[in-house]
Amino acid sequence: MKQLAFLWWVCNNEDKMETEFFVESWQKFRKLENRVLDFLIKHYTVLLVVFATVLAVTVRWKFLSYESRDFTDFLLPWFTALKEGGGLSALATYSGDYNAPYVTILALLSYLPFSPLVLIKLVSIIFDFVLAGAVAYLVYTLVTDKQHKKGLAVLAYIMILFLPQVMLNGAFWGQCDAIYASFCVLALTFLLKERYALAFVFLGVAFAFKLQFIFILPIFIVVYVVKRKFSILNFLILPITNIVLCLPAIVAGRPLLDCFLVYFRQTKTYAGQVVLNFVNFYGIFGGEARFWNVAGVILMLIICAVALYWIVRSKMQLSQQKTLELTVWFVVVVTFILPGMHERYLFVGEILAIVYYLAYKQHGVVALMINAFAWITYAYYFSPNTNFNYHYLALIELFVLVAFTKTVFVMNNNGSKRITNTLERGRL
C-alpha cells in the first residue's frame, strides 16, 4: 500500500517535481558560474599575462620559417662552422664578429639535433620574454601609485612583447638585440634602486653581448659624478664580467684580448658607410665616412661632456624620474650623432622611451617618433627596393630632439621653467 501511495503522489506532483528540479539545477549552475567569475576576476592579471604570453609565442612561431639575409650570410655559416668544428672546441677558431658569450650559446646549441634556424631564433625569442619581464619590473619600480603600478607593469610587459621591432628582431630577423637590451634594462633598474654593484654586473653582461651597451653608459658616469655613492673602481666590473662570460672560449684557446678586440673589428666592418638604414644627423647633412667616422665621434663626446658639465653646474637633482629621462636623452642623442648606426641601434632607447611615458605620462611624442621611425626602417630593410628618403624624417627628429633637450635641461619634470640663476649669472 505504501508503494502505491508513493506512485500516486509522484504522478500527481510530477510537474511540481520537474519545476523544483529545474530551479535547483539552475541555482547550482548560477553558483558555479559566479565561482568561475570570481576566479577570473581574482586572477585576472595572471590570466591576462598568460594569455598575452601564449599569443606572443604563437605569433613568433609563425615567423620561424623566414630566413633573413643576415641568417643565410652570417649566422648559418657561423653555426655550421661551430657544429663541424666540434661545438665548444671550435670557439678557439671561430671567425665571426660577435663576442664569445653569444657564440658560446651557439656552440652549445650545435649539439642539439634541430634546425639551426629554429635554435638560433629560439634564443632570441626566449630573451624577448626576459626583456618584457625586465621592463615590467622597471615600470613597477618607478610607479609610486600602488593602485596602478601592477596594472602598468602588466601593460608594459604586453606592449614590449608586441612591439613590432621586438617581434621582428628575433623571431623574424634572427637578431639577438633582446639579449643585451634585457641586461641594459636590468642594469638601469638597479642603478635607480641604488644597488650599484648589481647594476654594474648587469651592465657588464650587456657589454659582453653587444657593444651597444655604451648608449646607456653615460648615465652611469653622470650618476657617479653627481651622486658619488660608488667608486670609480665599479667600472672595472664591466671588463671583469665580460672576461668571466668569455671563459669557455678562453679555455678553448681563444686569446683573452679577443674578448675586447672583437668590438673594434665590428666598427671596421662598415667603416665605409656613414649611416646604415637609420634616421639620424647624417640623413640631413650626409658627408664622407672617412671624415665623419672621426668628427662624428668627437662631436658626440663634446655633446656628452657639455651635458655632464651642465648637469653638475646646475646641481640637477637625479631623482628616479630625472635619471630615466636623462638616460633616454643620452641614448637618442648618441645614436643621432654617432656615424655607422644601424636600424637596430636605438632598440634600448625605443623601449626606455615607452617606459618613461608609461611611468610619468611625459615625452609621448619622443616615444612615438623614435618607435615609428624604427618600424619604418625595419619595413624598409625587408623591402629594400622601396623608394624612401630619410631626409625629412631626420629633420623631424632634429626638431623633436631640440625640444626634448630643452625640456630635459631647462625645464623641470612638471614642464615649468627650472628656477636657476646659472645662465643669468654667466656661470655657464
Image: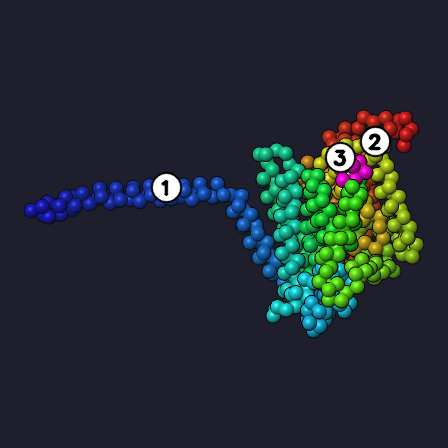
* SS state under label 3: loop
Residue 313 in the image: above or below residue 108: above
Task: Please give the range of residues in magenta.
Answer: 224-230
Q: Are marks 2 and 1 in contact (CB under 8 Å)?
A: no
Write the residue at 81% across / 38% down: 225
**In which image quadrant can residue 324 be found?**
top right
Mark 2 = which residue? 314
Mark 3 = which residue? 318
Q: Which quarter of the rendering shows the C terminus?
A: top right
- Which of the pair 96/300 is nearer the observer? 96
* SS state under label 1: helix
Mark 1 = which residue? 31
Check if residue 358 falls in the magenta segment. Answer: no
Is residue 372 at least partly visible in the picture?
Answer: no
- Give the farthest residue toward the left: 1
Q: The residue under label 2 is which amino acid type?
A: Ser
Residue 104 point in image, percent of width and height: 70, 63
* SS state under label 2: loop
Q: Nearer the viewer, mark 3 or mark 1?
A: 3
Within 10 Å of disc 2 (Cα), the crowding (few <14, some 14-19, many 20+) is some
Image-based side of 130 in relation to 27, left or right = right
- Which of the pair 379/351 is nearer the observer? 351
**In which image quadrant can residue 75 be found?**
bottom right
- Which of the pair 319/48 is nearer the observer? 319
Q: The residue under label 1 is which amino acid type?
A: Lys
Q: How much space separates mark 3 and mark 1, taking CA atoms?
A: 54 Å
Q: The residue under label 3 is which amino acid type?
A: Leu
